[in-house]
Image: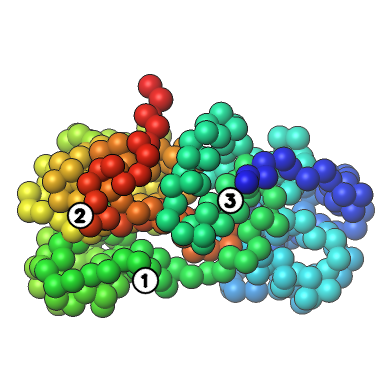
């Protein structure tokens, strides 16, 4: 079901790793200019960074060059991790490079010298420690595509083997709005983690006869962008707060764009509130992309889930345990949901779990979900 054992290093990979960690020799490059490339630069004597889409000429004191000028005998580490790692590898191979390694493999083989992507830290340990929950979820999913997606994504996250992600492609244009999510006149939408307002605009396109939207975004700059984008729409409430399980103020790391999140090391503070407190009217569709606070936000939406039975679209990729904690929280409140899983990139980002109300079926339509561990 889940393939969690990492494949042994091939002879070619062992030779690439030796070349990467050695001083001198043939030139070595990182594809991309990001935190992952910086991690590689700390342990590899890079000749430069490859980036065909920038006018910048240096990064971390090394030249930034176009792929076409890199010697074909160079060893290249692809540091494209989040969204399109397979496309990046295909570009390198199409350009004629034969000594290519993806970041996931380098992190796996480097014995801790290169950090794994943040979203994968502790993933293997969580999966192995809570394998029964993952197996329960596999049996609880509503369709074959959900089960296939779960098995591939969990196998990838547990093994750091990118080959498990073959078959996925960029599909963020349909994120949160699958065919099994049906809308009717008078929907009340909650956008938890609106960022730039694009999801709210997509909801308007799918449900033009909505009754209301409640837009939550704790950061002032994204909230202002969202206000401007949605200014022509009626019946929209803007709430500059994060969703959580209590009303308080929390430290916030605002420097990561759409990935900004609650963090003890954050340089600013935000207000957070509960959905139950902030929105009194019944809601019919809740989207949560709150950068790792999804479980806390769901605890703060207990009344709405129990009383309104809304459709739910919840991101589960920020923390590995969210793959099983999110469904356990929801289904221990109400078990009358069909559960779907979809993944919208080639990499670690954008795995969404959907909960579609099962009409007139009561809470006994599925086996009782396992309790959350204390």
The image's mark for residue 360 is 2
Please tell me whether mark 2 sits on a helix, a strand or a loop: loop
Quadrant of the image occupied by residue 50: bottom right
x 27%, y 69%: residue? 182
SS assignment at label 3: helix
Q: Earlier in the sequence, mark 2 or mark 1?
A: 1
Q: Residue drawn 46% across and 59% down?
A: 143
Q: Quadrant of residue 52?
A: bottom right
Nearest to the eye among marks 2 and 3: give it: 2
Nearer the N terminus, badge 1 or badge 3? 3
Whole-percent x, y for residue 156 in the image? 63, 49
Q: Which residue is mark 1?
A: 179
Give the residue at mark 3: 151
Q: Which mark is residue 305?
A: none
State the residue in front, 137 or 9. 137
**Which residue sits at x=20%, y=54%?**
360
Q: Are marks 2 and 3 in contact (CB under 8 Å)?
A: no
Quadrant position of the C terminus in the picture: top left
Q: Nearer the viewer, residue 70 or 218?
A: 218
Disc 1 from disc 3: Cα separation: 22 Å
Answer few, some or many: residues within 10 Å of disc 1's Cα (few below 14, many 20 plus, some between 14 and 19). Answer: few
Q: CA distance from mark 2 to mark 1?
A: 21 Å
Can residue 310 be spotted in the picture? no
Residue 45 seen anywhere in this rendered image of the structure: yes
Is residue 126 positioned above or below 304 on the image? above
Q: Where is 373 relative to 54, above or below? A: above
In percent of width and height, residue 168 lies at 58, 65
Q: Is residue 155 above or below residue 343?
A: above
**Mark sitting earlier along the chain (2/3):** 3
Give coordinates of residue 33: x percent, y percent: 61, 59
Q: Secondary structure at mark 1?
A: loop
Q: Residues within 10 Å of mark 3 (few under 14, many from 20)?
A: some
């Amino acid at each position: 079901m889940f393939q969690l054992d990492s494949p042994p290093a091939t002879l070619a990979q062992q030779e690439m790793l030796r070349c990467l960690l050695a001083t001198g020799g043939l030139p070595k490059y990182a594809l991309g200019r990001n935190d992952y490339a910086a991690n590689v630069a700390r342990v590899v004597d890079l000749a430069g960074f490859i980036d065909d889409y920038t006018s910048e000429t240096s990064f971390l004191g090394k030249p930034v060059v176009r792929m076409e000028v890199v010697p074909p005998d160079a060893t290249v580490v692809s540091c494209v991790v989040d969204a399109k790692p397979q496309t990046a590898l295909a570009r390198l191979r199409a350009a004629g490079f034969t000594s290519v390694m993806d970041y996931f493999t380098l992190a796996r083989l480097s014995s801790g010298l290169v950090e794994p992507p943040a979203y994968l830290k502790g993933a293997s340990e969580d999966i192995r420690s809570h394998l029964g929950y993952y197996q329960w979820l596999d049996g609880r999913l509503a369709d074959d595509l959900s089960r296939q997606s779960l098995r591939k994504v969990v196998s990838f996250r547990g093994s750091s083997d990118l080959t498990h992600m073959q078959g996925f492609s960029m599909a963020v244009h349909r994120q949160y709005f699958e065919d099994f999510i049906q809308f009717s006149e008078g929907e009340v939408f909650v956008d938890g983690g609106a960022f730039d307002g694009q999801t709210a605009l997509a909801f308007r396109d799918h449900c033009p006869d909505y009754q209301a939207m409640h837009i939550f975004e704790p950061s002032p700059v994204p909230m202002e962008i969202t206000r401007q984008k949605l200014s022509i729409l009626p019946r929209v409430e803007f709430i500059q707060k994060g969703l959580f399980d209590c009303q308080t103020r929390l430290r916030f790391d605002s420097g990561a764009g759409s990935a900004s999140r609650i963090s003890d090391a954050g340089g600013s503070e935000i207000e957070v509130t509960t959905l139950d407190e902030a929105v009194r009217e019944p809601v019919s569709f809740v989207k949560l992309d709150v950068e790792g606070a999804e479980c806390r936000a769901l605890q703060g939406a207990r009344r709405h889930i129990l009383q309104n039975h809304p459709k739910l679209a919840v991101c589960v990729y920020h923390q590995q345990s969210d793959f099983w904690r999110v469904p356990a929280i929801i289904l221990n409140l109400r078990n009358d949901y069909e559960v779907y899983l979809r993944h919208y990139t080639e990499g670690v980002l954008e795995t969404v779990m959907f909960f579609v109300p099962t009409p007139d079926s009561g809470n006994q339509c599925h086996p009782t979900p396992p309790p959350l561990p204390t």
